[in-house]
Amino acid sequence: MEDSGYWAENMRLIGALLLVWFVVSFGCGVLFVDELNAITFGGFKLGFWFAQQGSIYVFLVLIFVYAAMINRIDKKYGVDEADDGPADGPDDGRVD
């Protein structure tokens, strides 16, 4: 496995997702609030909705996007968690 390539790709992914989260939470909730407040969503002004709820929903979606994308990166570099069965033998529920 090429460690530097794996981590570079991982850090690019994290950077891109953080940028999306920043734009949605700070941009839509603070910077563009006046423009977004001209639109209503569920009875609330859209700028208010993004500041209170939208950024949280986007964050949750980004978690799932990260999980899917990092699985692809893991497979690409051969570090995925293949389901080969238990590594230490059968799990009988005992704690050693």
Image: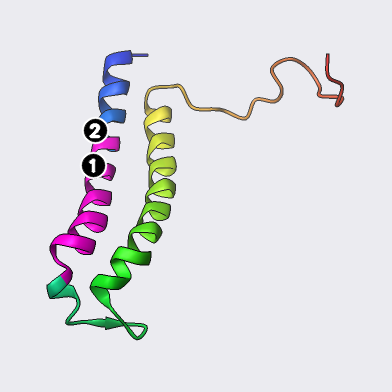
Q: CA distance from mark 1 to mark 2?
A: 6 Å
Element carrying mark 2: helix
Residue sitting at x 22%, y 45%: 19
Along the line of sight, the residue nearer the viewer: 6 or 39? 39
User: Which image quarter: residue 68?
Assistant: top left
| Rendered location of residue 4, percent (x, y) | 27, 15
Residue sitting at x 23%, y 71%: 47
Considering every residue shown, the one lying at the far bottom of the view is 43
Magenta extent:
14-33
Answer with left or right where residue 31 lies relative to residue 70: left
The circle on residue 53 is: none
Q: Residues within 10 Å of mark 2 (few under 14, many from 20)?
A: few
The circle on residue 12 is: 2
Image height check: is 28 above or below 89?
Answer: below
Residue sitting at x 17%, y 69%: 33
Residue with the mark numbered 1: 16
Residue sitting at x 37%, y 28%: 76
The majority secondary structure of the magenta stretch comes to helix
Q: Residues within 10 Å of mark 1 (few under 14, many from 20)?
A: few
Which image quarter holds the C terminus? top right
Element carrying mark 1: helix
**Marks 1 and 2 close (CB-CB < 8 Å):** yes
Which image quarter holds the N terminus? top left
- Amino acid type at mark 1: Ala
Colouring of the image: rainbow
| Rendered location of residue 84, percent (x, y) | 65, 25
